[in-house]
Amino acid sequence: MDRDQLMDRFDLTGRVAIVTGGSRGIGRAIAGSFAAMGAKVVVASRKADACDQAAAEIGAEGGTAIGLATHVGDLADLERLVAGTVEAFGGVDIVVNNAANALTQPIGSITAEAWQKSTDTNTRAGLFLVQHALPHLRESRHAAVVHLVSCGIFTSGYGMAMYLAGKSALLSLTRSMAAELASSQIRVNALAPGVIDTDMVRANPPEVQELMLAGQPMGRMGTPDEIATAALFLASDASSFMTGQCLVVDGGQTTH
């Protein structure tokens, strides 16, 4: 395989990608990277102005993107997201479920309301967005789904039970989807970041951030771009013989 053939494996020209939570952090980096590789990107997040700003920035960088305000906890919004994507770009080839709700409560204090809010975003949204997009993914010659989970699902989950329960369920769904959709040539994989330098992480008190980095062999947070390149691998033909797997990008924080 020569250089051009190798680069072609990562090329997304002509493909349509939905990226939830795409207006900032990891999602924004993924949206920008996919657009840079030729994809037509739909940036989805709760705030319309943030979506539009991200899409405008991608456009200024030479990419093609639109913003569609979406509350992924609302099933009707997920249906509208897919419909709006198809209306704008004619189909769906790639779905990146990145939107997350970091809400967590200690064992003994978890409320039913908090549990529902957490799982609606962290688990249910991933399932139903894929189901809404499924007829279009089946028509694609390069269909790929990437679920963002967390390397924390491979740890004790101390203090993050509710959040990590939802992400663990999403990993289980990844495997089930991969098995059931393989005959339709739809690949489904998960991506598990470690501690990444995002607004969500920086919102924690300094002592919590220090705890998150405890035992981190590389001694630093990862960057959103380092996760975006991993997502590009999973969404592109570079991983064409890979499905039902979880790619851990955590600086060595977890071991297997």
Image (tube, rainbow, N blue to C red):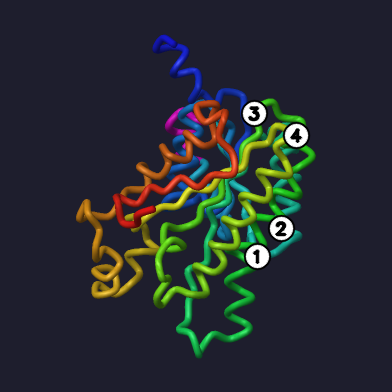
Disc on the earlier residue, 1 or 4:
1
Reading the image, the residue beneath label 3 is: 142
Rendering coords of residue 189 (x, y %):
56, 44
Task: Point out which mark residue 184 bears.
Answer: 4
133 sits to left or right of 252: right
Disc on the earlier residue, 4 or 2:
2
Task: Point out which mark residue 73 bears.
Answer: 1
Q: Residues within 10 Å of mark 2 (few under 14, many from 20)?
A: some
Q: Which residues are magenta?
A: 56-63
Q: Residues within 10 Å of mark 4 (few under 14, many from 20)?
A: some
Instruction: Give amino acid for label 2.
Output: Asp
User: In this orientation, does residue 161 appear?
Assistant: yes
Q: Secondary structure at mark 3?
A: loop
Which label lies toward us, 3 or 1? Answer: 3
Q: Are marks 1 and 2 in contact (CB under 8 Å)?
A: yes
Task: Point out which mark residue 77 bears.
Answer: 2
Q: Are marks 1 and 4 in contact (CB under 8 Å)?
A: no
